[in-house]
Amino acid sequence: EAQVTQNPRYLITVTGKKLTVTCSQNMNHEYMSWYRQDPGLGLRQIYYSMNVEVTDKGDVPEGYKVSRKEKRNFPLILESPSPNQTSLYFCASSLSIGEQFFGPGTRLTVL
Amino acid sequence: EDQVTQSPEALRLQEGESSSLNCSYTVSGLRGLFWYRQDPGKGPEFLFTLYSAGEEKEKERLKATLTKKESFLHITAPKPEDSATYLCAVQGGGFKTIFGAGTRLFVKA
């Protein structure tokens, strides 16, 4: 089954404790992306990647890091999380320009 | 600066009452405009891609249209199961994706 998987689905952590949210897709897609979704603000793009070793900033990259060492994986790293990064995070992938397939989301709470 | 604005923020319809959702956009070099549906607690689900002004796409009770400045999602004779948040997004020359804040649709039986 074609899918985008994210782990963990739920995470509660404390300020400053480094964390990684994993994202994997099995569709051989070149384009992968991370978004955060906050009430009233919609989906905002954090980082995107056009292919392996190629990443670029979206609209809200501050406080986040990404890497794309393999085509299927695109982890999101928060090296020193803060409460304002409490949000619902989505990973997505697509062939190139076109429909994006979204993962189920990761709900992160930073205390 | 690339921007997407959706209206209205929320829309309440009776079953069978047709209406339209609006998506106004500003983007440098439009590569594509996308409509997604999102149910509570889930990731967005793709509906349509439109690439150039004048293009139209249809799927069941939904029809998407595109002009040089805006897109409309027309809902004909909606049913309660059409209740969801509808998201509009654009991709411009830089491959960034910009989403609007969405329109929450409620359809009452």
Image: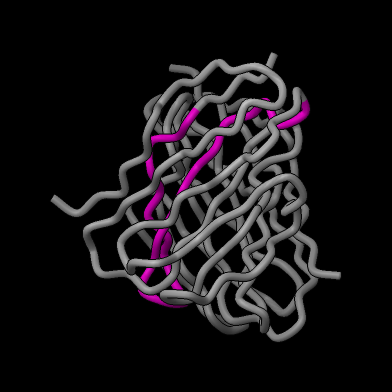
Q: Would residue B109 be found to the left or right of residue A49 on screen?
A: left
B45 horizontally vs B65: left or right: left
Eyeballing the image, is A87 above or below A50? above
Q: Give x and y (percent) for residue A24.
A: 32, 51
**Residue at horizontal 25%, vertical 50%?**
A3
User: Furthest residue to the left?
Assistant: A1
| In magenta stretch: residue B33 | no
Residue found 70% across the figure and 86% down from its top? B29
Please name the residue shown 47% across and 69% down the image.
B49
Magenta run includes residue A95: yes
| A49, B42: nearer the viewer | A49
- Residue placed at 71% from the left, 31% from the top? A85
Quadrant occupied by the C terminus of chain A: top right
Q: Which residues are magenta?
A: A84-106
Q: Position of residue A67 (x, y in %)?
A: 50, 61
Which residue is more in the foreground, B25 or A53?
A: A53
Q: Residue furthest right?
A: B1
Left or right: B107 as drawn, with respect to B46? right
Q: Position of residue A72 (x, y in %)?
A: 30, 62
Residue A81, given in percent of the width and then of the height, sits at 69, 31
- Say which quarter of the image contains residue A42: top right
Using the image, determine if residue B36 lies above or below residue A104. below
